[in-house]
Amino acid sequence: MSPMTRTKASISASAALVAAIMVYAVAIEPTRVTISTFQLPQGSLASVLAGRKIALVSDLHIGEDGSPLSETTLQRLDVIRPDLILLLGDFVAWGGGNRAYDRALEFLAKLDAPLGTFAVLGDADRTKSRRSCEFCHQPGSGAPAGSHRAVFLRNEARSLALPHGTIRVVGLDAGFAKPTVPQLSRLLAGDLPTILLSHSSVVYRDIDPTLDVLTASGDTHGGQIRLPRWFWRLTRLKPDPEHIHGLFRDGRKSLVVTRGIGTSRLRFRLGSPPEIVVLEFPGAAR
């Protein structure tokens, strides 16, 4: 084989490989809803939640025609059978119209967990402010939403009493200004083990590391492409480049960032598939 022929063959093989990667990243990986499990065996949360499972779901980005991943997510949750479901915002796609909100509310109506479902809004959910209100309460009324049982938290806390103790669930709403450190401290005050729901993880840096707080966040989509941390630090394409995906600890506080379900801007994922995060608290079942 002549050098020119070998060069042409090499170029053809490279082009075929690039084409195969593109097909996978556009048509296959974005549809693979995976389950990632993190075990949290220590701390006061673990002692109260021993033997239980929590599912984190974020960034569905449901469009006008719905999302096939919504049904897949529900099927995965049926398999996981979590005791508690935590929803981290961006239920609708950016610029989503009325039908997108209808589909998102239909998704919420199908969720059920023994200890309940708690949620916060993401920034995309504020596209239509009047429709976003329907996540929390009935239109034209302050009564809780009648179409689903999820409890939406807007810079507020709820206590959840369990047989072996009480935990606190705090939610930060992306539609409000980021709380100041004193405001955040007031929300987290007290000695109850706490789970903080925040669509973006930027709040994590403001939490006192002596507090027993687990922050759960989404927003990043895991970058949609798996890249080294230095890339995110250099480009600042994400508001919190130190925490793109995974479990992080600092003193007593910890943070879990999920890659979420949907995509934004481009339907493209490579090395960063959609996921539901499951938090397990090893110990005797309660």
Image: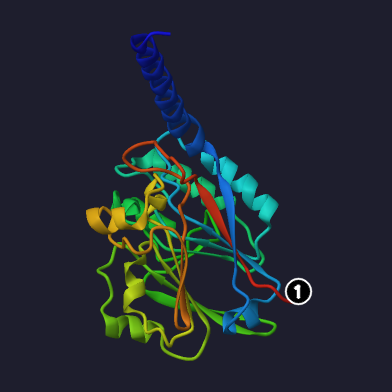
Pointer 1: what residue? 285
Question: Who is closer to the viewer here, 7 or 227?
Answer: 7
Asked which quadrant contains residue 6, the reply is: top left
Quarter of the image with the N terminus in it: top left
Asked which quadrant contains residue 177, the reply is: bottom left
Q: Secondary structure at mark 1?
A: loop
Question: Who is closer to the viewer here, 266 or 15?
Answer: 15
Work out whether residue 252 can be spotted. yes
Question: Who is closer to the viewer here, 75 or 15?
Answer: 15
Work out whether residue 139 can be spotted. no
Residue 99 versus residue 207 in the image, above or below: above
Residue 74 is situated, as x and y percent measured from the top left of the image, at: 60, 47
Residue 73 is situated, as x and y percent measured from the top left of the image, at: 57, 46
Quarter of the image with the C terminus in it: bottom right
**Left or right for 159, reference 203:** right
Residue 255 is situated, as x and y percent measured from the top left of the image, at: 45, 70
Q: Amino acid at mark 1?
A: Ala
Asked which quadrant contains residue 251, the reply is: bottom left
Residue under the point 63% across and 48% down: 76
Residue under the point 40% across and 38% down: 63
Residue 84 versus residue 47 in the image, above or below: above
